[in-house]
Structures are given as C-alpha cells and as structure tokens.
Amino acid sequence: MFDLTDGWEGSPPAGGHIVVVPHRPKPEGWSPGAPYHFVDDVTRAVATAREPAGDRAVVVSAGDVGGQAFALGLVEEVAMDVVPAVFGSGRRYFGPARAPLLLEDPYRVVQGDRVPHLRHRVRRQRAGDRARRAVRRLLTAWRRSSASTRGRRRRRGCPRRCS
C-alpha cells in the first residue's frame, strides 16, 4: 500500500504511526518528521507497531505481509469488506499461503451499501488438535503400508500371518 500511494506524501490518512515492511530501501529525501517506521522483518514490524499503540489495536494490511503475520500467529482478528465484483483473477487476500489459515464464523456482520463488513476471529489450533492429526496421519500411513503388505502376501499364496 505504501508503494501504491507513494507514502501518502508523508501524511497517512489514518494518522498515527505507520510501520512499513519495504521491498526496497527507504525513499531518498524522505521527511524525517513523517510518522513512518521502516522495519525489514514482519515480527519486528508488529512489535514496533505495538509500542505506540499501547493497549489499542494494531492493524495489519492484507497481502504478503499480512499473510506472513497470520502464519506467524500474530493476527487475532480479520476484518473483510466483501465487494460484489468478480474479476476472474487477482491476488490472494493474504498472499501465498504456506499453511491453512482458518477463521471462526463471523462474530460481527454489518450490511453496508452493497458491501457487507465482516469480522472473524482467527481459529487457533490447540496442542491436542495437532497431536490428534499427527496420530491420524501415522495410522493412515500404517494402514496403507499394512494393506500393501497383505496384498503381496496373498499374491504369493501365503496365509494371513506369514511374513
């Protein structure tokens, strides 16, 4: 967003402090008084944004940086505005997904003028859920290998328990 708006010429519309994770170095001649902090890492960017925010919310834009923050577990809530347009192609909302990103059902739905505004909490995986999935994967792999072994035994004419 920073690149597309040319940094709002040093005066962001939302005011406050803006943390930028740039793709290239800070622009030459950039106003030192502009409320921008340039940070090269998503985790550090969120930490930097939390300092002036205090107990208020920190907003992360969508796209690749938002997707990285989401994958790192730094996002608690997602706000989406659904525009009634189908373009046929485009960019993923959170950039390239490295793992499934799951949301709860919306807890707030506000119907605007042709645009619903949705708020979702991020679904966190509990340790028990991860362990159950790992056991399920192991059992599935064992069943597959066991089934292929049984098939080989039958083709050789061995009884069920022969090795």
Image (spheres, helix red, strand yellow):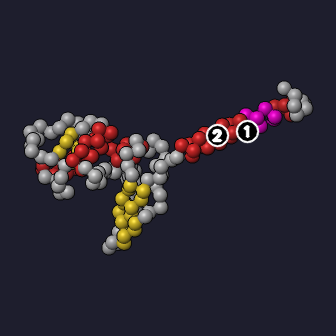
Amino acid type for the residue under numbered disc 1: Arg
- Magenta residue check for 148: yes
Residue bearing the label numbered 1: 143
Query: How far from the left and from the top, in percent, is residue 32?
Result: 9, 41
Q: Is residue 34 left or right of residue 131?
A: left
Which image quadrant for residue 85? Answer: bottom left
Mark 2 Cα-neighbour bin, 10 Å: few <14, some 14–19, many ≥20: few
Q: Work out whether residue 145 can be spotted.
A: yes
Q: Most extreme residue toward the top, as rendered?
A: 163
In this view, the mark in front (2 or 1): 2
Secondary structure, mark 2, is: helix
Query: How far from the left and from the top, in percent, is residue 157?
Result: 90, 31
Query: Taking 13 as reference, is 43 above or below it?
Result: above
- Magenta residue check for 101: no
Sequence-first disc among 2 and 1: 2
Amino acid type for the residue under numbered disc 2: Val
Query: Taking 139 as reference, is 12 above or below it?
Result: below
Mark 1 Cα-neighbour bin, 10 Å: few <14, some 14–19, many ≥20: few
Part of the protein shown in magenta = 144-151
Residue bearing the label numbered 2: 135
Query: How far from the left and from the top, in percent, is residue 138?
Result: 66, 37
Q: Nearer the viewer, residue 74 or 148?
A: 74
Query: How far from the left and from the top, in percent, is residue 52?
Result: 21, 47
Which image quadrant for residue 160? Answer: top right
Q: Nearer the viewer, residue 138 or 157?
A: 138
Q: Nearer the viewer, residue 110 or 155?
A: 110
Q: Are marks 2 and 1 in contact (CB under 8 Å)?
A: no
Question: Which residue is drawn at the image coordinates 37% and 60% (left, top)?
Answer: 80
Question: Which residue is drawn at the image coordinates 57% and 46% (left, top)?
Answer: 129
Question: Which residue is drawn at the image coordinates 12% and 46% (left, top)?
Answer: 34
Q: Nearer the viewer, residue 89 or 160?
A: 160
